[in-house]
Structures are given as structure tokens and as C-alpha cells.
Image: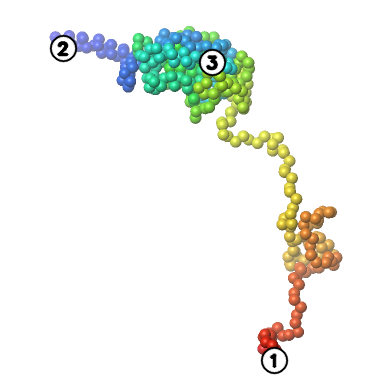
Amino acid sequence: MPSRIRMRRTAPALLCAGLLLTAGCTRDTSGGVPATRTGAATGPVLQPASDPGTAPFTASTAGGPALPPHAARTGAPRSPSAPGQALKRTGSTPGLYAGTRAVPSCDVEAQIRMLAVDPAREEAFAHTVSVARDQVAGFLRGLTPVLLRADTLVTGHGLRDGSVTTYQSVLQAGTAVMVDARGLPRVRCVCGNPLDPPTGRGDAAAGTGKRWEGFDPARTVVVEPAARPVAELVIADLAHHSWIARPAGDAGTGDRVPEKPPPYTPDTDITGPLPDVTPPGTKRPESPTESARPPEPTPSRTPEDCPTPDVPAPETPTPPGQPAAARGVPARAPGETHCPAPTGEPTDEPSGEPSIPERTPASDEPPTSIRLPRGADDGPAVRW
């Protein structure tokens, strides 16, 4: 009998534990801040641009002109390369984000102040973004406020009852975010929630919540970090149909026109095919205009550059009657004075034999005789 009672008490406890594990409830032991994981089994949460959600870290700091939902989508619906997978874009892709020149999309300083007045909230935020609490202000000032150009899949973090919640989310195009030096969204400005890259397959089609007009899982973007930190982001100013080069960590005061605009217009559908963008430092291919340039003029020849007349080989004598100029000696242009004139008297008589250097006249003495030197008192020279 005691064993049956014990089993009746144990079974509900095991069932409750199983439900908790299925729901994904955990407690983070790395930093002492409670964390709750949700949304893993039901799919990502669809979050409109102006919806702060149910677990905001702070009040909204989003500002500036709003981006009309899917204003840049002018192409036909895209077919995903693989079912259930979002489109991948590098964080440095020109036009991935939007904004208005000299107008910040988020108030970074207001975000810093709202976290600083609540030490527990600031500590939870610091733990989520993996920095020390006294580094939160520097972390936020190093981010760049922009607007999403496409529905973007992320991992969101909220704060509920002192615990950090973690969930998969699809942020609507037009959402104000702060991105880091590699182009990754790190903070959602309408609620102050930290953001990370998504986990899993990135299946936006399984998203829960009310779908907004123009939502298309095949057009949902996953942002991947740039290969190296970028000095500035090239964003689209759709209101003025222009490009903006916004320095990293700048809220808009340093905006300028990019030195080399992207090879497509600012309103190009960022979820469609994009022309290849030459990475910085890559050698630019030579243009047809440059390749057609005439060659540089050849400088005048100096005496050192004058060619040496070619001497025909003995086995190929010059045929009788052929002019001497045809024996390899280049013709000289009229009035040319750069090269020294050849020595010797010219002759019109052709010769079939190669020229032989002039030899010293032969002596009457035998070739074997040797004349010895003699002094003043010596007799006649003696020959041997």
C-alpha cells in the first residue's frame, strides 16, 4: 500500500517536470540573471514595426520618419531556394537598411538614460549583450540607428518580472534598430530589447501572430555578419531617392554622399537579385575606354640606342647587284641626326664577301724573324 501512494504522488510531479521542459523554461546559471526561453516550439513571433511586445526592456526610443511597409518591394515574389529557409544578406550590403539624412532612427542617449535609472534592468541588459554593466553606455554609443528594409528574422530578448525571455521573432520592414560594426541588428528601439542572430532553420512561414500586409516568408531576411568591421554603412534614403554613407556609431550627424554609389538604385528590392558589389580593396577591372587609349609616344633615340648594322652570315652572301642598304643596315629618315654616321667611304660596288677588318701592312721581313733591341753602342741588329 505505501508503494502505491508513493507512485501516485510521483507521477504528477514527473508530468509537471515534463511540461516545463517541453515549454523550454530554464534558468541561466552563468550570470545570475534568470532567463526564460519561449517560442521555440510554436515558431517565430511576428512583430509589427510599432509593436513593443509584451516584455519590453524600456520605453520606445524610435524616432524620425517611418518607412512605408514594403515600399521598396517592386519585384515579383521570390521563390525561396529551399523551403522553410530565409534569404541571407550580409550586414554590409548596401541598401539593406534605410534612413533619412541627418535624422537618427533611434535616440541612443535616451536608451542609455532609461537603463541607467534602474540598476537591475541595466544589469539584465548588460548580461544579455555580454558586456559589463559599466560598459553599457559605450556599447550603445557604438551602434548605428537605422531602419530595416525587409522583414528580418532575429532572436529577441525581453524582460518580464525580472527575468530575461528569449524568443525567435520576425521584425517587420520599417522597424527601427541599432546595428553593430558588422551590420548585425543588436537593439530594437521601440522596446529597447537586445537582439541576436536567429537560431535554427529560420522558418518564417511558421510565424505566429497577425500577418501584416505584404508579409511573405520567402522575402524574410536573415542578416549575417560582415567579414570585417565596416567604417560606414551605405543606407537608402527613400524619401529623397538617394544614398547615404553613415559612419559606424553615428546617429546621422556624419551622413554624407558615398564616394562610390552602389551599382543599383536606392529603391531596388533588397530581397531580389542584386548586382555584385566589388569588395573594398579589390582591383577594379579595366574599362573599355581605358583599354582603348593610344600608346604612349616613344621617346627619341639617343646614340646609345642606335641599332648596330646587321652583318650577313658568310653562308648567305648578298646576290650580285643588290644595293648595300639591303644588307641589314636600316634606312635613315631624311634629316635624322640622332645616330652617328657610319665611318668609312661609301661605295656603290656590291660585295659578296663579309667585311674584313683592315690589317697592318705586311713587312718584308720573314714572319719568324725577331728583332732584338739594341743600345747606342751596339752593332748592327741581329736577327734570329
Q: From mark 1 to mark 2, how far is it between C-alphas?
A: 153 Å
Q: On residue 379, which mark appears? A: 1
Tell me the residue at 20%/11% (across/down): 7
Q: Left of 317 or right of it: where is 59?
A: left
Name which of mark 3 and mark 1 comes first in the sequence.
Answer: 3
Q: On residue 104, which mark appears? A: 3
Q: From mark 2 to mark 3, how far is it between C-alphas?
A: 68 Å
Q: On residue 64, which mark appears? A: none
Q: Three-letter amino acid code at disc 2?
A: Ser
Q: Position of residue 325 (x, y in %)?
A: 81, 60
Q: On residue 3, which mark appears? A: 2
Characterize the local packing of mark 2: few (<14), some (14-19) or many (20 or more) Cα atoms within 10 angstroms: few
Characterize the local packing of mark 3: few (<14), some (14-19) or many (20 or more) Cα atoms within 10 angstroms: many
Tell me the residue at 46%/13% (across/down): 110
Of 146 and 42, which appears nearest the observer? Answer: 146
Q: In which quarter of the image is residue 317?
A: bottom right
